[in-house]
Amino acid sequence: MSMSSTVARLDPPFRLEGRRVWVAGHRGMVGAALMRRLAAEGCEVLTATRDVADLRRQDQTEGWLAEKRPEVIFLAAATVGGILVNDNRPAAFIYDNLAIETNVVHAAWKTGAVKLLFLGSSCIYPRLAPQPMAEDALLTGPLEPTNQWYAVAKIAGLKMCQAYRRQYGADFIAAMPTNLYGPGDNFELASSHVIPALVAKIHRAKADGLEAVEIWGTGKPRREFLYVDDLADALIFLVKCYSDEAPINVGTGTDVTIGELARMIAEVVGFEGGFRFNPGRPDGTPRKLLEVSRLKSLGWAPRTGLSEGLAKTYAWFLDNVAEPA
């Protein structure tokens, strides 16, 4: 599917005011950011905890949607994690995510949802996709082996939204965010992504007076990072302004090396030691930068620079995660 860098913007925009809006996955980092951002939209926000509706169970998902009948759905529920947990729990990553998106998308159509936004991931693109990665790079090459299970599930969810648009005319769209970070992130070293892992490790190194911090891999891979509250703003913008079967990338359009990122975090934390890179640990994809001209042409751009976002994230970590000194 060839896509131009410009895209038609909905006119008039889709309205959220007065609608029943369900944030699926409201306890996660993205879902919580959506909850914060939706507070300004004048809509009724619905949530469902797993004990009320386990979205991996079709009967529970369809029953809850039939009762509550949300008009707009942000499908942010997912099983997620960093390289290590992706590689160690492939069955959970493919099963949970396939089940959640299959059940929610189908039940959304059955119960007459007016609009659904499916949250994909930049890891759906081929491992060696041309950089920056445009939306039409999808399915043009092999995936990164360490997170292929998650990527395959997310590709299936994106294709489900396209299929329900084509067969039923459902206004279901898909957004592909880049690497995310911010308040509410997972800072457990064994299962976290790179920013929270480095924040926790560098904070601990400073507290313990260490001279150096070990960094997995070579430090050379390049990554793009988007502050999660900027993502929430982009997703609400897309629900209002976008309606097309083509997925749309959400990112900043700029990237840094892991080594540069570690030094930025050290500056925020106040750690004055050095770094030891461990090339025996996996690097993952060499580079992951999204091509974001389609989103930019609609009129959206992020507001939070990486240094500012890292400072906000570390402040949240100190208040909510770090053990008192």
Image (tube, rainbow, N blue to C red):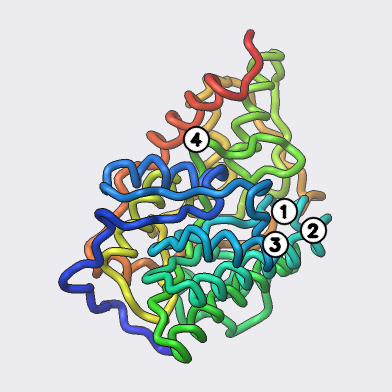
Q: Amino acid at mark 3?
A: Arg
Q: Amino acid at mark 2?
A: Asp
Q: Which mark is residue 83?
A: 1
Q: Are marks 1 and 2 in contact (CB under 8 Å)?
A: yes
Locate residue 135, reporting x and y percent: 45, 76
Badge 4: residue crowd in 10 Å (few <14, some 14–19, many ≥20): many
* Residue at the image point whose x is 34% and y is 46% from the top: 38
Front position in the image: 47 or 162:
47
SS at badge 1: helix
Q: In whole angstroms, how far apart are the C-alphas of marks 3 and 2?
A: 21 Å
Q: In the rendering, at what x and y percent does residue 283 appear?
A: 70, 55
Other residues around mark 3 within 10 Å, as few (<14) / some (14–19) / many (≥20): many
Q: Nearer the viewer, residue 252 or 177?
A: 177
Q: Between residues 206 and 25, which one lies in front from this camera angle? A: 25
Which picture quadrant has residue 73?
A: bottom left
Separation (CA) of disc 4 from disc 3:
26 Å
- CA–CA distance in space, label 3 to label 1: 23 Å
Q: Pointer 3 and pointer 1: residues touching (CB < 8 Å)?
A: no
Q: Residue at x 55, y 26 (%)?
A: 317
Q: Earlier in the sequence, mark 4 or mark 3?
A: 3
- The residue beneath circle 4 is 183
Q: Residues within 10 Å of mark 1 (few under 14, many from 20)?
A: some
Q: Which residue is mark 2?
A: 87
